[in-house]
Amino acid sequence: MKKLYILVTALCFFNGLSAQVINFPDAVLKNILISTNCVDNNNDGIADSDADTNNDNEIDYNEASVINNLYLDGNISSLEGLESNNFSGLKNLSIKNTSLAKISLSYFGSLKILKINNNSQLKSLLLTYLTSLSTLDCSNNQLNFIKRDNTNNIANVNCSYNNLTTLYFSDTNALTNLNCSNNNISTLFLNRLYNVFSSLEFNNNLNLNSICAYQSDISLIQNKLAEYGISNVTVVNSCALPPCAAGAICFDDENFKNSILGNTTIDLNFDGEIQFSEALQVTKMSIASNVKSINTIKYFTNLKSLTIVSTQIVETIDLTSLVNLEDLTVEWNSSFSTLKIDNLVNLKTLNINNNHNLSGLYANGLTNLSSVKCNINQYLSVFQMKNASNLLTIDCSNNAITSLDLLNGTNIKSIKCSNNNITYLNTGSTTNLIDLNFSGNKITTFTFLPFVNLQTLNFSANPISIFDLTGLNNLQKLECQSAKLSKVDVSYLPNLKELNCGYNNILTDIFIKNNNPNQDLTALNIIGNLNLKHICADIIDFNVIQKSIDLSGLNNVLLDSSCSCVGACSDAIINIPDPIFKAKLLSATNQNYVARNLSGSYFKIDANNDKEIQLSEAFNVYSLTLNESNISSLLGIEYFVNVGVLDCYFNKIKLLNVSNLSKLAYIQCQGNGLTSLNISGLTKIQRLICSSNSLTSLDLSNLTELTHLDCSANQLSSLMIKNGIDEDRLYITPNPNLKYICADESQIAAIQSQLLAGNIKDCNVNSYCTFKPGGKFYAIKGNNRLDLNNNGCDNGDIKFQNMKVNIANQTITNSSASDENGDYNYYVKSGSYDVTPILENPAYFNVYPITVKVTFPTESSPFTQDFCITANGVHPDLEVVLLPLEPARPGFNATYKIIYKNKGNTTQSGSVNLSFDDVVLDFVIAKPVPATNSFNNLSWNFVNLLPYETREIKFTVNANSPTEKPALNIGDILKFKTTIAGAVTDETPIDNTFTLNQTVVGSYDPNDKTCLEGTVITPSLIGEYVHYMIRFENTGTYAAQNIVVKDMIDLSKFDISSLIPTSSSHSFVIKISEGNKVEFIFENINLPFDDANNDGYIAFKIKTKPTLKVGDTFENEANIYFDYNFPILTNKATSKFETTLGTQDFVFSNYFTLYPNPSSDILNINATKDIEIKSLTIYDILGQVVIAVPNAQTVSNIDVSKLKTGNYFIKIKSDKGSSSIKFIKK
């Protein structure tokens, strides 16, 4: 009896394991399933039991899978759990009286009847792969759309009493009964084939205007139209699908679209489309199964997480527009071959695994990437991942990668790239590596010296014959089996615990003695080393080693503590694959000038005459002359570590890697046809001649001692030569493909002259590849805080923005300014500098320290100096500025920003007021909402505006079109006036009012510069601030990573020391240098290229010189740099100090008649003599421009109907000068 009990218990246990419980997050749905009659067991159409047949208050797979008829009736808010893999036997499903807004059902292959009724909030119905469905009743809901895919066997449909606008049944040849009455349908698509309708009802669709139908159904449809009394409906039998809805994404793959629509959080308006605005709300997406194309994913630019799994995508997957992406997984896809994710600077984690046809991964510029897993992509040969500066771990094993270049990977801790075809591995400039595994590749040599933190290393199954692990004192585990080693010497590794060096057929000696008094060796594998003769070790480790010898089955292996070579291990032979190169080395004598030793004398390299080159022989070589020798490869050169001079020109070398030759100073390799020259990490090169090759790029930014460069006659498209030194001899041309050169500022002019002489006109030259100086430099940085409570500055105090900091030595004074966080940062060369904070109003504040002196390299870098600002007395001082974020165009909306700031030292409350011409402008919206909104006027209140705090108001107005009355035309002037008032008297009231005079335009340049005071400025602003705004727009096809706005200030007209930024669209750094050069640097802005997000701007104010006078003009323009492209030169913003009319060059009435005067609408201008009009301008009595017509050669009348009643002046500029006359507007 006891045994039987145990057996029953076991059976119950295993039965429980097989019945998986289904999770139903919605409590109402679960309650219906376990507590109500919802299952029809006898197919009579009446529910007669619940679904919980074992009464355990759960629904498991066994219970769900046998249900054929299920009736759900109740306030269900989620159908999660009701999936086809759970309810696989469903044939009849009814869903009623729920609170669902969307229902998505997929892969119910047995489902024949589906009834969805009386769901008062249901707007969206998505049905996919219901291949057996014959009857669909979805009447009496609030459906906006029905989306179907692979449901082509439907015969009966009732979708009446919904809000459908379009109905598409062209793909359902089985359909014979349809009722779509009482909707809002405008277009019906019923042009399926074969079967005619037995029953068709579409009454009470008041917007119906078009029906596309099968020819045999047309007479039935026309009879129905007559029965319903409907006219003006077009009925045709040939039609195309409707175009994509306005504002919606036009998908080229319906499966992709359907997978998105199945997500209840994306189609926010339940219209069955994905609007561009809806796409921008999506931050997470998973793509799977039958999706074949995701080209339209480029519109989902705010995605942060994306998964692409088991799709049928064939074309290149290009995700470069997803600039906000943080996590990407692409796995188990069978067809696509190329993945592009370059410059996704927000990407943090990347998983690319088991993609069976993937051959190319382009992932450069992922500056925030920290983790990569890229495994088992069997055809992946191209793997690009340069400039992943924050990468910590990468695992790209089991692919077909041939070259792995992790250039600028400065923080990598773990690299795993085993089982590829790698011949070249660049681990970047990291010294943080802890784990390195490149086993199973084709690497012949590798430099381990920089990786002093390495703990585990595996270079097994590579043709490496020599290795040097000097300095790797933290190494604990080494695997080097199946290599080409004749000697393994790890005696200098004090912490090594595990060594696996099996299957090295030529290995004779192992040196593992590290003189550690305690046993440290825990594991040794020497299996397969058939020629092993000798192991030298500490006596305390003999026990572990002897067990390994016994296990390996090796005989006659001497184990001792004497480290003298038994085999030929003392001086390893270098593997030199190219026979011509090897023969050239062996031919060297003291007579033929092939090689010089460390003393400078020509000598014989093969000193022992064994026809091989040993390490000791290579170490003696200082210079090599290998010219014109027909050599194809210099593999093996990496062991000649003392070479300082290398001449190898006019050979056939295609790939040259000399990165291990740290003492190299002179190299000539011209005339080889080189496609790759690796000099990474080298700093001592003084002379580099690599002309007449096929190089496409050169990065010489580390060559801080370079004096002679000849890289002419290549295929270079880019040259990075910003290295902190001006080369004495520099030969760049010809290089007809050159597009970009990055150089030191001091060398740009000379390079541009050389390009011009070489007829290279489309190559951009600047220093913006990096915003740090070339060569050796030092950093000065700090943080500025305003201490309001006089207890010393700390993190709780106010961040002091835009405070200028001068950095001066004996010859130059440059400036930086603190950003929105109060931080400043500046780079300098060696020398002594005075660092001094500069305030706009120095009488308002005290700064500590007043100045500080720093000397480099005496001080360590970065040198940090914070400045603490305290109030000096009480100084109330507010300012306000108005910025046009968009041009004003007739008939269009335009958005503006009011910037108001407390630049005093006491907290203030008050109001901001805006006046504008409400006759031609209609207020649309503002954020924040105005406190008052009246004709021509908006106002906002503000409370507790802290010292140096800036706030913003954004508002939008709509400009009248030329057909409205009064009309707004191109050339008209829109005048905005904004004021700010506090509760106390302001110390500088001149900036409490700001007037924007904006000219109405038609077409416009998106990259422009504007003086916000206008083209004609009152003389009262001489010596005062004027305001400029520079707008830029990325009109390219790729996100712009860096943008620089460079402005050369005219020092004869402006006081550059007064320049202060007032607002910007994105974070920036300002740099003022060379006396008058101002650079606004938007580093890592990653400005998108889609029209909704591709705009930016910088605004600043600057004082004019007080020596200017009435009639003087001042002008300004800027260059805008987008990454490495040619700069865009803005328009020249020209303004003039003028009284209202200025001087009169001729008598107006002698040349023109003006009528009628007074005028109420049209003012006519007729010339009575031969004179050419250039421009017309109308001023009010305050001297402010109200109408401007810049190109007025053919103008004979002006519409003045929108002007207010009063006196005005019209000024004409002509080929005979200027003149004006007064007129009256009635």
Image: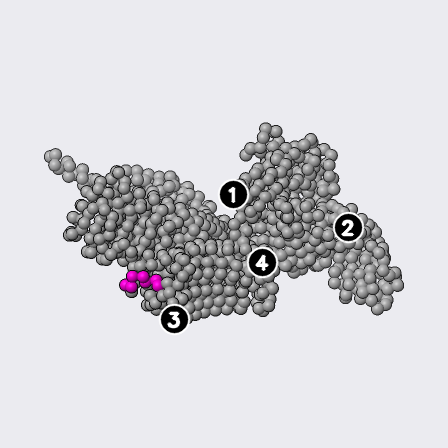
Q: Nearer the viewer, mark 3 or mark 2?
A: 3
Of residue 997 and residue 548, the one placed in the foreground of this image is 548
| Residue found 43% across the figure and 51% down from its top | 429
Highlighted range, magenta: 604-610
Q: CA distance from mark 3 to mark 1?
A: 49 Å
Q: Nearer the viewer, mark 2 or mark 4?
A: 4
Tell me if mark 3 has few (under 14), some (14-19) or many (20+) residues whose alpha carbon lies within 10 angstroms of its own: some
Q: Amino acid at mark 2?
A: Leu
Residue 630 is marked as 3
Is the residue 55 above or below the residue 1124 in the image? above
Q: Amino acid at mark 4?
A: Gln
Instruction: Identify the element where label 2 is drawn.
Output: loop
Q: Amino acid at mark 3?
A: Asn
Residue 963 position by quadrant: bottom right
**Relative to residue 797, is residue 695 drawn left or right?**
left
Disc 3 and disc 2 in contact, CB within 8 angstroms: no
Residue indicated by mark 4: 747
Q: CA distance from mark 3 to mark 4?
A: 37 Å
Q: CA distance from mark 2 to mark 1?
A: 44 Å
Residue indicated by mark 2: 1108
Tell me if mark 4 has few (under 14), some (14-19) or many (20+) residues whose alpha carbon lies within 10 angstroms of its own: some
Is the residue 1225 above or below the residue 911 in the image? below
**Relative to residue 1061, is residue 475 drawn left or right?**
left
Q: Position of residue 283 (x, y in %)?
A: 46, 48
Q: Nearer the viewer, mark 3 or mark 4?
A: 3
Residue 819 seen by the camera: no
Residue 861 is marked as 1
Disc 3 and disc 1 in contact, CB within 8 angstroms: no
Q: Nearer the viewer, mark 3 or mark 1?
A: 3
Prevailing secondary structure class for the magenta stretch in the rendered image:
loop
